[in-house]
Image (cartoon, grey):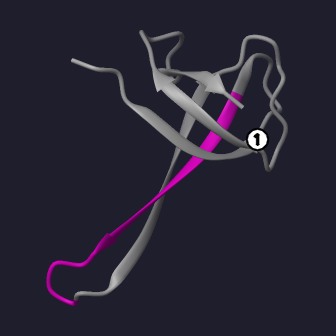
Amino acid sequence: MPKRILQGTVTSDKNDQTITVSVERRFTHPVLKKTIRKSKKYRAHDEKNVCKVGQTVRIIECAPRSKTKRWELLEG
């Protein structure tokens, strides 16, 4: 099964080697037929601490790195 790749915006880089990425998805409501925006935050591994807040990055699935980290930085 291929690994998922998501694109989002860095919302936090306070922790060492960790970034928080907010990923927004848009979809049409099945009944109202209105476009809805939903966002979810993912914690990703940033080996060299290169990302800054507000930057657009791509993250990829990986094996669990810690209790909350299941993603790693692909490019940013």
Membership of 15 in magenta stretch:
no
* Quadrant in the picture for residue 26: bottom left
Task: In the rendered view, tell whether residue 48 sits above or below residue 33.
Answer: above
Residue occupying the point 71% across, 19% down: 46
Residue 11 placement (x, y as % from top left):
72, 47
Looking at the magenta stretch, what is its main secondary structure? strand
The residue located at (75%, 16%) in the rendering is 17
Residue at (42%, 9%) from the top-left corner?
Answer: 63
Q: Which residues are magenta?
A: 19-32
Is residue 65 shown left or right of residue 33? right
The quadrant the N terminus occupies is top left
Q: Quadrant of the C terminus?
A: top right
Give the labeled residue for mark 1.
12
Q: Secondary structure at mark 1?
A: strand
Residue 13: percent from left, percent from top: 80, 34
Q: Disc 1 marks which amino acid?
A: Ser
x and y percent of residue 30 in the render? 16, 78
Quadrant housing residue 19: top right
10 Å crowding of disc 1: few (<14), some (14-19), many (20+): some
Rendered position, 64 above or below 49: above
Quarter holding residue 34: bottom left
